[in-house]
C-alpha cells in the first residue's frame, strides 16, 4: 500500500510532535534529540527488523503503519501488534529486537541511535517520563487486546479493531469529533490473522457493519465512520 510520505523540515512540522516520545521536551531538549536523530523510510511490505536483529536504533512512527509479528518454530506466524503514528519502536537497553517489524504501508521513522538515546533517558526527565507513560499505555492496550481475542464475538472484534484505528487516526487529524475517515492500513487477510478469524468472517462482518450504516467504504481500504460512539457501542464495551 503506497502512501505519500511528507518531507519534514523541523520538529515543528512533525505531525506527531505532541503525541510522540518527545512531546514533553522543551527547546533545549529537542536540540539534544536533533543531534542524534535521523529519518528513515520503508516501502510497504519491507521488513524494518527481523526478530533477533541488533537493535541499532529506536524511534517513532511518523507516518504509516507497521506490524509486529512472531514466528513459531513450525512456521506459523501471528501478528502481535500494530504500530501507528506516534508509537515507539524498539526497547532501550535491549541489544536485540524480539519481533519481526514489517511496514504494512509506506512508513517514515524518526530514528534515534540507541546508545545516545539511552543516555538521554537517564539525563532528561521529560524523555524518560514520556517513555514510561507510553509503555504503560502499551501495557493497558495489550491487556485490552487479551479481552478482544479471548472473549469477544467476531463482530465485536472487527468493531474493536476499526474503532481503535479510527480513534487513533482522528486524534492526529482535525475533524468534527463525531466521525472519522481513514485508510485501513492492513488487508482483510492480515485482519483475520490479527483477530484469530477467517478471511470470510472478516469480510462478512465488514459488510454487515456497512449495511447497518456503522461504516462506509467504496473500496476495501478507505473507511468512513459516521459516528464513533455508534461503532464503539458494537465493541461490547461501555465507555
Image: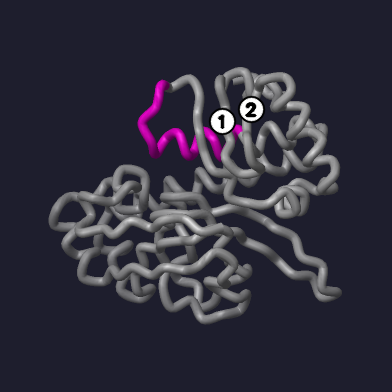
* Left or right: 66 in relation to 147: left
Query: Residue 7's x, y, as percent?
Result: 29, 59
What residue sits 52% from the left and 39% below the top?
182
Front residue of this view, candidates 113 and 2: 2
Q: Can you give x and y, in whole percent of width and height, for residue 131 in the image? A: 40, 53
Q: Which mark is residue 157?
A: none
Viewer-proximal residue among 53 and 5: 5
- Graded by Cα atoms within 10 Å as few (under 14), some (14 to 19) or many (20 or more), the crowding at tag 2 reads many
Q: Check residue 170 for magenta coloring.
A: yes
Q: Residues within 10 Å of mark 1 (few under 14, many from 20)?
A: many
Secondary structure state at the residue bearing disc 2: loop
Asked if residue 212 is positioned above or below residue 46 in the image, the reply reads: above
Q: In the rendered view, would you say 49 is above or below 238?
A: below
Residue of label 2: 215
Per the rendered image, the range of residues in magenta is 163-176
- Decide whether the magenta segment is chiefly helix, strand or loop: helix
Asked if the residue at tag 2 contacts the one at tag 1, i.e. Cβ–Cβ closer than 8 Å, the answer is: yes
For the residues labelled 1 and 2, the Cα–Cα distance comes to 6 Å
User: Image height check: is 237 above or below 35?
Assistant: above
- In the figure, residue 8 lies in which quadrant? bottom left
Q: Position of residue 56 (x, y in %)?
A: 43, 78
The front one of 20 and 169 is 169
For the point 82% across and 32% down, which residue is it? 153
The quarter of the picture where the N terminus appears is bottom right
Q: Any magenta on residue 237?
A: no
Ranked by sequence position, the earlier of labels 1 and 2 is 2
**Side of 73 relative to 144 (left or right):** right
Task: Name the residue rendered at 82%, 73% in the picture.
Answer: 75
| Label at residue 224 | 1
Quarter holding the C terminus is top right
Q: Is residue 191 above or below residue 91?
A: above
Query: Residue 229: x percent and y percent?
Result: 58, 19
Amino acid at each position: 500500500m503506497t502512501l505519500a510520505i511528507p518531507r519534514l523540515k523541523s520538529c515543528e512540522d512533525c505531525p506527531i510532535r505532541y503525541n510522540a516520545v518527545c512531546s514533553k521536551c522543551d527547546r533545549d531538549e529537542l536540540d539534544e534529540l536533533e543531534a542524534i536523530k535521523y529519518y528513515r523510510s520503508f516501502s510497504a511490505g519491507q521488513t524494518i527488523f527481523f526478530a533477533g536483529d541488533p537493535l541499532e536504533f529506536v524511534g517513532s512512527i511518523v507516518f504509516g503503519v507497521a506490524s509486529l509479528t512472531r514466528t513459531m518454530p513450525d512456521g506459523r506466524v501471528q501478528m502481535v501488534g500494530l504500530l501507528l503514528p506516534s508509537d515507539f519502536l524498539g526497547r532501550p537497553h535491549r541489544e536485540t529486537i524480539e519481533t519481526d517489524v514489517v511496514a504494512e504501508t509506506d512508513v517514515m521513522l524518526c530514528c534515534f541511535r540507541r546508545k545516545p538515546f539511552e543516555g538521554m533517558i537517564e539525563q532528561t526527565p521529560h524523555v524518560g517520563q514520556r517513555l514510561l507513560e507510553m509503555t504503560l499505555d502499551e501495557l493497558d492496550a495489550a491487556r485490552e487486546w487479551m479481552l478482544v481475542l479471548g472473549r469477544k464475538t467476531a463482530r465485536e472484534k472487527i468493531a474493536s479493531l476499526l474503532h481503535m484505528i479510527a480513534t487513533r487516526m482522528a486524534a492526529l487529524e482535525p475533524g468534527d469529533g463525531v466521525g472519522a475517515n481513514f485508510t485501513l492500513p492492513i488487508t482483510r487477510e492480515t485482519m483475520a490473522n490479527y483477530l484469530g478469524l477467517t478471511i470470510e468472517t472478516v469480510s462478512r462482518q465488514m459488510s454487515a457493519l456497512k449495511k447497518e450504516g456503522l461504516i462506509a467504504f467504496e473500496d476495501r481500504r478507505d473507511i468512513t465512520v459516521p459516528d464513533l460512539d455508534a461503532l464503539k457501542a458494537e465493541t461490547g464495551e461501555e465507555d
